[in-house]
Amino acid sequence: MKVILTKDITTLGKSGEMKTVTDGYATNYLIPRQLAVPAAGGAFRAWQHDIASREEKRVRERADAEIAATRIASTTLTMGVKVGEGGKLYGSITNKDIADALARRGIDVDRHKIDLDEPLKTLGTYKVAIKVFAGMTPEVTIVVEPKG
């Protein structure tokens, strides 16, 4: 019997997948526990539509990510900061500061996706990678210079 899984089952598959199982397993275990629905009629058509809409959404997200990656790669952020002796900063530049600066430029980025091992604590020019989408990590250029 063909069923469409409604929840993840470790031994069988993930939610949304269509699987062929024995009739007894489907009617006595999966369907009564609402772990699956029979893949017949309306449920099958809804499953096909769901797969198509997920694919469209993924394509749309990838296109948006490519646009964002292009904008990020062509962006140079100039951060003016207070500086002490020897070019050391008062404080540091963190992921949140970078995300806020990008947001002011109209680029929304989650601060957790910014690949900064340690906060920037000295003057200079840095390249920081930002994870936009699977396999897409453009680098933004950050120039840290004295304020004033």
Image (tube, grey):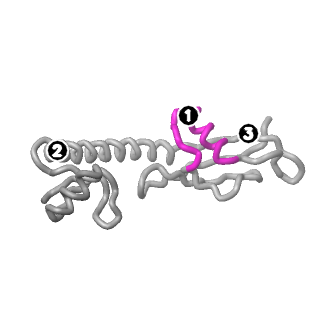
Q: CA distance from mark 1 to mark 3?
A: 16 Å
Q: Position of residue 36 (x, y in %)?
A: 24, 52
Q: Secondary structure at mark 1?
A: loop
Farthest bottom residue? 11
Q: Earlier in the sequence, mark 1 or mark 2?
A: 2
Mark identifier at residue 43: 2
Inspect this view and state whether residue 16 appears.
no
Farthest right residue? 85
- Span colored in magenta: 94-112
Q: Position of residue 106 (x, y in %)?
A: 52, 33
User: Residue at label 1?
Assistant: 105
- What amino acid type should be assigned to the residue bearing mark 2? Ala
Q: Few, some or many C-alpha atoms within 10 Å of disc 2 (few <14, some 14-19, many ≥20)? A: some
Q: Is residue 6 left or right of residue 72?
A: left
CB-based contact (under 8 Å), mark 1 and mark 3: no
Q: CA distance from mark 3 to mark 2?
A: 58 Å
User: Residue at label 3?
Assistant: 80
Q: Position of residue 44 (x, y in %)?
A: 14, 47
Say above or below: 148 vs 2: above
Report the front residue among 7 and 93: 7
- What amino acid type should be assigned to the residue bearing mark 3? Gly
**Residue at (10, 44) in percent of width and height:** 41
Q: Earlier in the sequence, mark 1 or mark 3?
A: 3
**Residue at (29, 52) in percent of width and height:** 33
- What amino acid type should be assigned to the residue bearing mark 1? Arg
Q: CA distance from mark 1 to mark 2?
A: 45 Å
* Camera-nearest label, 1 or 2: 2
Mark identifier at residue 49: none
Q: Few, some or many C-alpha atoms within 10 Å of disc 3 (few <14, some 14-19, many ≥20)? A: few
Q: Within the image, what quadrant is residue 80 found in?
A: top right
Q: Is residue 29 magenta-colored?
A: no
